[in-house]
Image: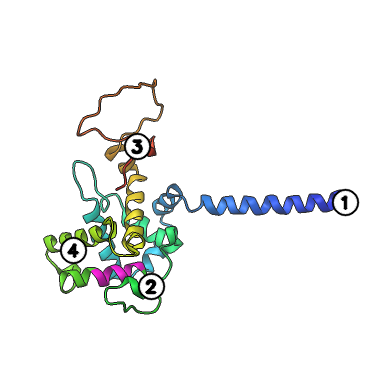
Amino acid sequence: MDNRTRDAGGAGRRQFLMAMAAAGAALTPVALWAQVRTGADAPAAKALAPSQQALLDRVADLTIPDSDTPGALAVGVPAFVALALAHGLEGAGAPVPAARFTGGAAPEGATVLDWLTFELDLKTGGAFLAAAPAAQAQALAALDGAAYAPGGPPGGDASPWRVLKGLIVTGYYTSEAGASQELQYELVPGHWDPDVPVGPHARAWSNDWTAVDFG
């Protein structure tokens, strides 16, 4: 093999690695929020049926409601999640198996939002979005409890709700309000202090993701 062949092969490998790196970078939360801010998420939002968008809005609001800081709906997390679903982040674009549906029946190619609609409608005894707010909160709490219950039914750790909730939480805590108001953020950290008093209302630091408990 002469030098030109080796150089061509090296260039090909470099281009491949650069392309893979660029593809990975394109799917980071920061990159997704940038697309949301510039309106590049519009096709993903249009891909959702109005009922699915309304469901996503309501579930995001129930998951992280407004408090003394803006909640998930207020900061635009549904748009982030819609874009994440369109990209298939965390496997969210894969069809949900029929076994995940209560009763074991599901339409072919069912999405995570199809599954969520079915399960929440079932738990509220009708249309989830038409149910009273208290009934909606109770239904989602039951779904969440089953998904995260220790020693729960086989496959509980693979519940589609865990994927969707993970996207909601990730979107919220990587948003400007989530990272700088719900959490604390300091652009230029000061000196290291090994003993910092922490009270019941102390906020975690978004500079240090290891300190964030995502539940």
Q: Amino acid at mark 4?
A: Ala
At label 2, counting other C-alpha atoms closer than 10 Å, the crowd grade (few under 14, some 14-19, many 20 or more) is: some
Helix, strand or loop for disc 4: helix
What amino acid type is highlighted by mark number 3?
A: Ala
In this view, the mark in front (4 or 2): 2
Give the amino acid type for the residue marked by disc 1 in the picture. Answer: Asp
Sequence-wise, the earlier of marks 2 and 1 is 1
67 to the left or right of 10? left
Residue at far right of view: 2
Mark 1 and mark 4 in contact? Answer it, CB < 8 Å: no
Residue designated by label 2 = 97
Which of the two marks, 2 or 1, is nearer to us in this view?
2
Distance CA(mark 1)–CA(mark 3): 53 Å
Which quadrant of the structure image shows residue 182?
A: top left
Residue drawn at 20 percent across, 72 percent down: 122
Q: Indicate yes or no whether the magenta region holds residue 128.
A: no
- The answer to whether marks 4 and 3 mark residues whose Cβ atoms lie closer than 8 Å is no
The label number, if any, that marks residue 139 in the structure image: 4
Q: Of the two numbered discs 1 and 3 on the same chain, state the one appearing first in sequence.
A: 1
Residue range in magenta is: 112-119
Question: Horizontal and vertical percent for residue 160?
Answer: 34, 63
Which tag, 4 or 2, sits closer to the chain's start? 2
- Residue 49 position (above or below residue 1): below
Instruction: Return the residue at label 1.
Output: 2
Depth order, front residue of 84/111: 111
Percent coordinates x, y for residue 175 in the rendering? 35, 45
User: How far is disc 2 from disc 3 in space, using C-alphas?
Assistant: 34 Å
